[in-house]
Amino acid sequence: MNGLLASPCTRPALFRPIPSSVTRLLPAKTLALPPLRLPRSIRASPPPPRAAAQVAASAVGGLLAPLSALEVGLRSINLAPLRPPIAAAMSAAVRWLGVYREVLLVGVLFSWFPNIPWDRQPFSALRDLCDPFLALCREVMPPVFGRKLDLSPLVAFMAIDILIMILRPQPRM
C-alpha cells in the first residue's frame, strides 16, 4: 500500500476522532502519510532569529506541552452521543435552582414575621432548606448596621441567578 499504515479501527464509537476536512480526503483506512523528504538540492532555510519574548514563550510552551497534548486528545473524542444527557441534566439543574429560588423567597419573606413558630412544621423544614445556603452567603456579605440589616438573601439570589444563566442553553445563531 505504498508505505501507508492501514488497520481497521477497533475503538468504540465514542472515542473515534471527529473527521476534519483533511481526513475526509484520505481513504478510510489511512492513518498516516509517509514523511515528506526534500531532494538534496533543496535545503531547508534556517529559522529566523526569535525575539526574547518568543524564546520565553517557547520555554513556557515546553512546560505546557503535556497540557496541549491532552487538549488535542480531548478534542479528538466524539462527544455527540453525550450532548442529549448533558442537556437534560443542565435543564433539570436549571429547574431545580428555580424551585429553590422560590423556596428561598418564601423563607426570606417569612423571616420578617417574628411570631412564626419556626420549631413546627412546615416552617422548620423551610428553615432547614434555606438557612445553610443563607449562612454561606452571610460569610460573603455579613449583616450591616449592627446586625440589623441582613443582605445575604440578595447575595443568594444573585448567585442562583448567575448559576441559572450559566446553565441555561444559549440559542444558536
Image (cartoon, rainbow, N blue to C red):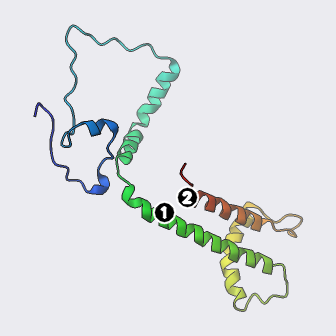
Residue at numbered disc 1? 87
Residue at point 27%, 10% (across, down): 43
Quarter of the image with the N terminus in it = top left
C-beta proximity under 8 Å, tags 1 and 2:
yes
Residue at point 35%, 52% (across, down): 78
Instruction: Give how far across and how far down residue 40 sits, in percent.
Output: 19, 10
Residue type indicated by callout 1: Ala
Instruction: Name the image quarter holding residue 111.
Output: bottom right
Residue at numbered disc 2? 169
Instruction: Name the image quarter holding residue 112.
Output: bottom right
Which residue is most to the left?
1
Badge 1: few (under 14), some or many (20 or more) residues near its Cα, within 10 Å?
A: some
Of residues 146 and 92, the one drawn nearer to the viewer in this rendering = 92
Element assignment for label 2: loop
Of residues 119 and 86, the one drawn nearer to the viewer in this rendering = 86
Element assignment for label 1: helix
Badge 2: few (under 14), some or many (20 or more) residues near its Cα, within 10 Å?
A: few
Of residues 62 and 12, the one drawn nearer to the viewer in this rendering = 12
Instruction: Name the image quarter holding residue 36.
Output: top left
Residue at point 21%, 39% (across, down): 31
Position above or below: 170 against 18: below
Instruction: Give how far across and how far down residue 130 sits, in percent.
Output: 69, 76
Residue type indicated by callout 2: Pro
Position above or below: 121 against 22: below
Residue 56 as seen in the image, left or right of residue 66: right
Instruction: Give how far across and how far down residue 159 sits, in percent.
Output: 68, 62
Can I make out residue 131 in this image?
no
First in sequence: mark 1 vs mark 2: 1
Between the C-alphas of marks 1 and 2, the distance is: 8 Å
Residue at point 85%, 64% (across, down): 144
